[in-house]
Amino acid sequence: MSMTMTQKILADHAGLDEVVTGQLINARLDMVLANDITGPVSINEFISNGFDKLFNKDKVSLVMDHFTPNKDIKSAEQCKQCRTFARKFDITNFYDVGNMGIEHALLPELGLVAPGELVIGADSHTCTYGALGAFSTGVGSTDVAAGMATGMAWFKVPSAIKFNISGKLNKHVSGKDVILHIIGMIGVDGALYKSMEFMGEGIENLTIDDRLCISNMAIEAGSKNGIFVVDDITKEYIKDKICRQTKAYFPDEDATYDKVFDIDLSTIKPTVAFPHLPENTYNIDEIEAMDDISIDQVVIGSCTNGRLSDMKEAAEILRGKKLHRDVRGIIIPATQKIYKQCMHLGYTDIFIDAGCVVSTPTCGPCLGGHMGVLAAGESCVATTNRNFVGRMGHIDSKVYLASPAVAAASAITGKISSPN
Amino acid sequence: MKAKGTVHKYGNNVDTDVIIPARYLNTQSHEELASHCMEDIDKDFVKKVSKGDIIVAGDNFGCGSSREHAPIAIKASGISCVIANTFARIFYRNSINIGLPILECKDASDSIDAGDTVEIDFDSGLITNITKNESYQALPFPEFIKEIIDKGGLLKSITEEGK
Ligand code: SF4
């Protein structure tokens, strides 16, 4: 019986020689993650069901990122609950104001997730770590409570869609444009319950940051996980971060896929998802043929595009320029480390001189929490991953999803614009 | 196990941000979450809903974030079951894990209208539309999942195993 990459990881973690699509399995976990929103729900479940031990204090991560630094009393209480729990159970990987970052940027940066590992997180974008060849998927708080207690979780083995990548990206085109293009093509339920598996000679032209961005938005096509084949780029990325044994899984030559898509990177153009679904995509040529779409705000950050390469891309476009007078620019490096690098590399100066604010790491506006919530009628170009109704604030506001390059270019012109 | 109630009907891709907007995620009180349930898509839902009512929707119900607050808000608002053509996967597992019954059934999703009275038999998966005098067959839960629901959720099923 042949298996996909995902199926092999699941089989190994369930202690089975093979698994088939649709099979229900109980699998061993390498990391269990929760944040300041989902953590408290998990903690309550954990305590109220009488658990008094973690399965492994090194394999639980709690990251305070959504409403931190706390935006109000209720969110302060939630973080306090997580903090108390983390101290009581001596959780090694507890990240709070001062050392935190947005969870899905932070965990790979710290080497807490590795190729071949099985990770669950009470956050839908946990699928991000597929970029490193891990099986990682978002679950709910109850799954996390059970995972923290037992180190196990139940899964239904998914079938998969294969993306055969070839070619090379053009200037100012990045992983964000690739994944928006794919979601536009297959739809927000195009990969429902399935894995998205990325391979082919073209992946050598995708950096780890591009891959993290692509895997991050796999959930936006409904998929269970989005995983890349491990190659030299992956190995180079993890080499200074991870000393434990890792394992690369490759799909069987004759693995069956529900569908196969060929993606030639050189044909992809800057792409923007219009309100209110990530599948409403238009490429920049189509947008330039439309009437101008003026904007009130630009947000560059989030677990999708808050990494150093995203900051670099934005800085290169904003260097020596000023934001349009009607646009507010909010830049949020995703982790403390990236924040510091932005200072050392002079990006922070460029952003501030252009008229942007540069925030401490936080999810903030991405989920309409704080640090840039929109009023009725306002429009924002954001490098985030969701543009649902009310996602960034008022239900009559609009979010356009784009790459850092498009977002930075649009901030200068005041309307959705090409970075070229 | 059976459920019976009046139907509230929605379309495709009802996401977790409209089921329970992020601005209310700073609470875990089930009642408070329920009081904002569906607010951004149907501001009268909270006023209309009565205990035992059923939600019927199209494709990909519950897409978006992993917030368990979404099925919790629905369950706490009194809804006895959600029927859709398809569910987003995290929403699906969250619902099972917290004990909110959900069924996938294309015929029911296509044919049932808002205001219909519907009865569901969870053991057989049979959905009866009393108003229209029709019935639709959903797949009943697989054994493994039934066990979780029967024991009152995932954690109860684990603690029971440990005993
Ligand atoms: S940045 Fe946005 S999408 Fe990412 S974890 Fe935070 S809220 Fe979720």
Image (cartoon, coloured by chain):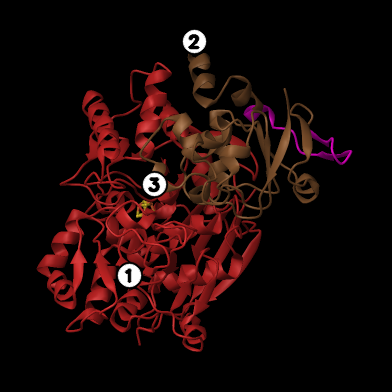
Q: Which chain is red?
A: A
Residue A47 coordinates in the image, percent (x, y)? 37, 20
The amino acid marked with disc number 1 is: Gln
Q: Outermost residue toward the right?
A: B133
The amino acid marked with disc number 3 is: Arg
- Residue A133: image quadrant is bottom left
Q: Which chain is brown?
A: B
Residue B40 coordinates in the image, percent (x, y)? 51, 51
- Residue A157: image quadrant is top right
- Magenta range is B125-145
Residue A204 coordinates in the image, percent (x, y)? 39, 71
Please state which of residues A171 and A262 is positioned toward the viewer in this rendering.
Answer: A171
- Tag 2 residue: B163
Which numbered mark, 3 or 2, is in the foreground of this view?
Answer: 3
Same subunit: marks 3 and 2: yes
The amino acid marked with disc number 2 is: Lys
- Tag 1 residue: A297
Q: Secondary structure at mark 1?
A: strand
Q: Chain of mark 2?
A: B
